Amino acid sequence: MPKSRIPRTLSLNEIATLMQGQEALPPAAIFTIATMSEVQLSQWKRSWDALSADRRAALMEQFRDTAEEEIEKDFTPIFLHGLHDADPRVRLAATEGLVGEVDAQFVEPLIARLEQDTSEAVRAAAAQALAPLMSQGEIELLPKAKRDKVYRALRAALQREAQTSPVYRRALEAIAYVNTEEVDWLIRSAYHADDDLLRLSAVVAMGRSANSAYQPFVRAELHSISPLVRGAAAIACGELEDEEATPDLIKLLDDPSETVRFAALEGLALVGTQAARDALERAAQSEDEAFADAAKEAIEVWEFWHGQMDFPLALFDEADLKPNRIVRPPDED
């Protein structure tokens, strides 16, 4: 088999010249930027800060997209620098680039964006990025002082922001990992609200709560007229391991919405019933190549969580014992 080629590294002068252009950066430039030393990063920042706002926004979006597709590349120093950019488009892309990061070093920078940023979109992205950190805090993989900072920041955002704002919705979804009566009240209040997007966030929050009392509510939303709600409910049923939802999740594999079909795969992977496993096997035979590939990924998730293991879970770091999201194409709804 041919060996994968490692792109050659470029000099910082070459990088600066490419950044001043109008085209997307080539792989060699991306590789160089993702592997810079601290000294090189300091020099790179000077070239970066001299770029126009439009160019900085376009490049930060490229870094964000590359980080999502090629997880081995580390752009976190770039994203941290971008959080302080004068242009909200750059701050947004940088904040979105940090979604999924769980290291404690990101707590304060993200809280600062949530509390201080003038852009509603950036504040919402910051709340979204704090969700994995809140989750880590609840399983004691984040220092308690950091965990408490995240909780207080999210709780303050819920008090400060309008319920109809995306910031409120993302903060609710993030704080849902905390199992308290107050959070339960917030989730239930959102679910019974008139605002459809707020109710959607409530369904997401129910799934993250690990509270089986929400199972009937989430299961009912599998029949929603909204594909966004059906998709969120499918994933939430899986997260809540609602075995009774299995038949409805199987039906959603034939949903008119592609987004819902892929979400159903994710839900079935987590529910853990044998019927779910059998349905995933059938889905893996689909003529739709992307759907079949996603079904095979879902089977791997099912096997990890519910199959017979030949090795003890103690061999794994607890941070690794969580399912990967099923890869799906962009939403079309």
Image (spheres, rainbow, N blue to C red):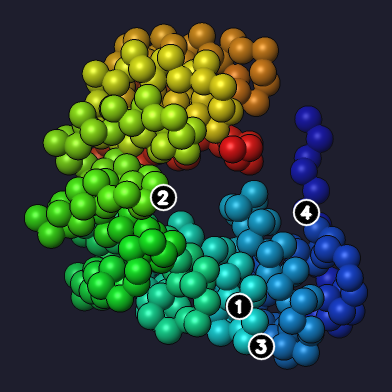
Residue type at mark 1 is Pro
**Residue identified by numbered label 1:** 88
Provide the residue designation for mark 4: 6
| Residue at screen point 37% across, 24% down | 223
Secondary structure under the numbered disc 3 in the rendered image: helix
Cα–Cα span, label 1 and label 4: 34 Å
Residue 270 appears in the figure: no
Going from the N terminus, do you reach mark 1 or mark 4 first? 4
Q: Which circle, 3 or 1, is nearer the viewer?
A: 1
Pick whichever, 82 or 216, lies toward us: 216
- Tell me the SS state at disc 4: loop
| C-alpha span from label 3 to label 4 | 24 Å
Q: Is residue 134 above or below residue 238?
A: below
Residue behind mark 2: 197
Q: Which residue is mark 3?
A: 42
Q: Residue at x 72, y 62 (%)?
A: 62
- Nearer the viewer's eye, disc 2 or disc 4? 2
Most extreme residue toward the front, as rendered? 194
Residue 300, position in %: x, y?
45, 25
Label 1–label 4 contact, CB within 8 A: no
